[in-house]
Image: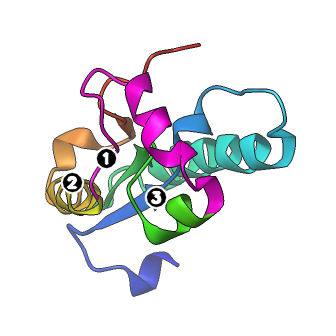
Amino acid sequence: MIPCVILRSSIIFIGSTLSEKAVGGTLSYSTSKHAVVGLMRATTQDLFGTGIHTSLVCPGFTDTPMLRKHLGDDADSIASNNAYGRLVKPEEIAKLVLTTAHSPALNGSVLHANLGQHQT
């Protein structure tokens, strides 16, 4: 992989709000998202000194057609589970990914984009 990556570029992983916590009924999903954290951290170590940085963006509940199809009318009710009372906008995640891609200072970071999700 390394020979194909341009010097001073970035590798941005996309996780989930469940990348660093777990809730009942999400065994397989939570396990796979926790694995992404390990993959990013191992990649950060493997790329040490190459000028290539990595990070992990973990979106919270994001207002997408897939979420609305999956949750139906409950999609708006889960918005009350964060400090802003709304779902994350896809363009907010896109802006964070772009910012992260251009910010070597965030190397190895796990960034939660969940509007201050209430921990239950």
Q: Secondary structure at mark 3?
A: strand
Looking at the image, which residue sits at the far bottom?
Answer: 4
Query: How far from the left and from the top, in percent, is residue 55?
Result: 38, 49
x then y, percent, for residue 39: 61, 51
Kind of residue sitting beneath label 1: Val
Asked if 113 appears above or below 50 in the picture, the reply is: above
Q: Report the coloring of the rendering.
A: rainbow
Residue 2, percent from left and from top: 46, 75
Residue shown at 22%/61% (left/top)?
Answer: 101
Name the front one of labels 1 and 3. 1
**Which range of residues does the magenta coloring cover?**
70-89
Q: x, y percentage for residue 72?
A: 58, 56
The residue beneath circle 2 is 92
Judging depth in this view, the residue of 114 and 56 nearest the camera is 114
Dot 2: element: helix
Residue at 30% over, 38% down: 86
The answer to which quarter of the image holds residue 69 is bottom right
Between the C-alphas of marks 1 and 2, the distance is 7 Å
Q: Residues within 10 Å of mark 3 (few under 14, many from 20)?
A: some
* Residue type for callout 2: Glu
Residue, disc 3: 13
Label 2 with label 3: CB-CB less than 8 Å? no
Mark 1 vs 3, N-terminal side: 3
48 versus 105 height, above or below: below
Observer able to see residue 80: yes
Q: CA distance from mark 1 to mark 3?
A: 18 Å
Badge 1 vs badge 2, beta-carbon distance below 8 Å: yes
Q: Foreground mark, 2 or 3?
A: 2
| The C terminus sits in image quarter | top right
Mark 1, residue position? 88
The reply, left or right, for residue 102 in relation to residue 25 is left
